[in-house]
Image: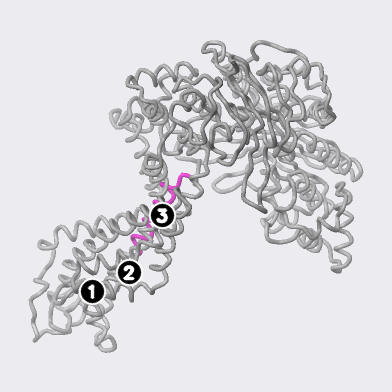
Amino acid sequence: MSMLDVDGLNVWFGKHLERVDAVKGATFQVARGESFGLVGESGSGKSTILRAITGLAPDWSGTLSIEGQPIAKKRPKTFFKQVQMVFQDPYASLHPRHSVDQVLGETLHLHGFQDIDTRVVKLLDDVGLGQKFRFRYPHQLSGGQRQRVAIARALAPEPELLLLDEPTSALDVSVQAEILNLLTDLRADRGLTYLMVSHDLSVVAHMCDRLAVMKSGDIVEIMSVDALRAMNATHPYTQQLFKASL
Amino acid sequence: MMNNLLDVENLWVKFPNRNGVFDAVRGVSFTLGRERLGIVGESGSGKSMTGRAILRLIRKPGIVEADHIKLDGVDLLGKTEKEMRAVRGQRISMVMQDPKFSLNPVITIGDQIIEAYRLHNSASKADAYRKSVEMLEAVSINDPERVMRAYPHEMSGGMGQRIMIAMMLIPNPEILIADEPTSALDVSVQRQVLDIMDKLVKERGMGLIFISHDLNLVADFCDRVLIMYAGRVVEVCDAKNLHEAKHPYTRGLLNSLPRLDEPSKRLEVLQRDPEWSKAPSVSGRV
Amino acid sequence: MSDTQTLREWLLTETPTSRRHAKISAFYQGWLTLRSNTMAMIGLGILVLMLFVAAAAPLLAPHDPFVQDLGNRLAPLGTEGHVFGTDSLGRDILSRLIYGSRITLYIVALVALIAPIAGLLVGTVSGYVGGWTDAVLMRITDIFLAFPRLILALAFVAALGAGIENAVLAISLTAWPPYARISRAETLTIRSSDYISAIQLQGAGAFRIITKHIWPLCISSLIVRVTLDMAGIILAAAGLGFLGLGAQPPSPEWGAMISEGRRFILDYWWVATVPGLAIFTVSLAFNLLGDGLRDVLDPKAGE
């Protein structure tokens, strides 16, 4: 049984005449412990799939299931204990008036944990930040540090599936390397499953086992990373994308 | 020496704050000929500030200091704000990262280009229109007549950036400063925009300062590269030799990139040496 | 010396050691930003002085503000014992001003508590929940906005009965719609931000998101707006007083003092001018402080 099963997913915005179909009949499976990539240019609908899974994009049809259990339209609290998301822009994903301690503490509280203090300490250690960052506000953190806090927040409920929406595209390359290493380590330590969106083929190649290539809402090709590294594409759009990325 | 369009000596950009003075750019020197000069560095390295300081576009309370910033042998520092306005656009143009913020959303693209053209040239409306269409054709826009009637929000990112480049080139400047002109664009569009810039710079014999965080892009596109760290230039090299760069910072940046052709379990992490920010700035003068 | 130095370091540290330390430190940083704004400090100084004057009114006032001396009416500025002269009933204007500051502060404080809170509540709920709730709440807001402020206040006071408390209530009832509009607009931008999405993904409910995540961000712009509106509030109170529906004579409310002095403005200009200057100074002080607070509180400004 796969960790995540997306079958015939359609996502749209707006109503009637203004309706825009962002994702059209997307179908793929992500096995437990696997890391799956979604690549494509801006507007191809890759981030929209993540938002539909988490319920942030409310208008969708098709079947989404986590470990064989179909996801209801109204996500129960237990769903968020299984699935968490890391956003693209660490400058926008942290509340500007909440300290790191508040962000993590509130998350833990919402998931009903009792030993909040010890867990906050442990989470900060796990993402390589340490105690001295605990009471800082976002404006006192660099982009990479913020993204570490965002990752810690996503890890707080101890999820099994982590959705990563371009987690390093807003960061410098040296910081990107640190964050990608952290994500690799966390996956190994906790047996996480990743669904990662990126426009950067080399990042996807580094992080993922398989990937789907998207173009204007359609998945045009699903391939292994080995095929990506060998530039072995069957679909003309994928070939074009590979050529442009070289 | 006469080939130097721009000559910058010992440029500092300072921001006084509560705890003293923060130096965003610290003693940068370089010259620019009819070439494509890349400035690379991470965020906060002072690369954008360097570009803006040349045009004196640093917001208050920032201060620009330099021994000289010479454009064709004339020091820009000695110019008044009014004279600088004539330099900006007319002789040195700047293309910003996001075209959406650079175009007026309620005026058609055609009117904006025509206005820009008539600001710099005394031409009749019909002439300006013709010239504008030509400019759009020069940046590989297929149906310039339709684009002239459109509003900025109807344009994609790549189109918007081409339009910006067209507008910047109207007064026929000697120098174009491009600050991350393609960072907001998709890879396929990125390539097209770069090709257009490349063609124009070559045809017109302009000098180009290309500011970017993307090492591979700069190595590919520029002739010469300045690598900046903490407000200083740590290394200067020919773009084609960038991958053989010697400074540990440049090496660290290159190695921290994931590579398609070389799978690795973990990426190399840049170890920052405090010495780098203390060493004097390397001169980029030729 | 070394002690104060370490206290400053403790306050400005980048690595706070406890929740309280972090809060105090953030507060101190804000205070430093505010302190570097000279105009805001002048405004704050005037307001602190006014607070002090209001508190110590019985000690500071040279005369009883209610005692009439018809033999000495309309005395000019600088008269022996009456620095600001006397009004049409021979009461000392300075003493009335000093006691009047209490009434002004009382009105301002009450309105500043009621109107923004009501507006914040309506605006954030409307903006976050959206749909029908939004439509209904915003139409109600529009109805309130459609009436001229003073007319509406008049209608309320007429219904509730004259008096300062009712005047305050009436002014608050007419003052909340702009705050609701502002907080709704802010909420709409905040609602679509990633950090709200992120907390939604932790299963947080609407109540928690509105009170803990949206309010703290709306409050700063409301505080700024309130300080900028203070002048208008003082004047509205004065207007009601003038129409006999606010502060009742002989209470030394500043606006009522102006309307009283208006009758003699050509021959005895100071009777209306002195309380006018007082209102002007306090309004200016609130405006200056509001401007400074915006720099401190607005999370968008600065890094």
Name which residue type carries label 2. Phe
Q: Which residue is mark 1?
A: C159
Ranked by sequence position, the earlier of labels 3 and 2 is 3
Q: Chain of mark 1?
A: C
Determine which of the numbered discs, if any, sits on residue C280 in the image: 2
Give me the residue at 62% from left, 45% from top: A13
Q: Quadrant of the C terminus of chain B?
A: top right
Question: Of helix, strand and loop, which one carries label 2?
Answer: helix
Measured from the top left, where is residue B70 in percent x and y?
Answer: 76, 44
Q: Chain of mark 3?
A: C
Measured from the top left, where is residue A25 in percent x and y?
Answer: 69, 34
Magenta range is C284-299
Question: Of helix, strand and loop, which one carries label 1?
Answer: helix
Determine which of the numbered discs, if any, sits on residue C123 in the image: 3
Q: How would you classify the magenta stretch by its main secondary structure?
A: helix
Ranked by sequence position, the earlier of labels 1 and 3 is 3
Closer-to-camera residue (A73/A152): A73
Name which residue type carries label 3. Gly
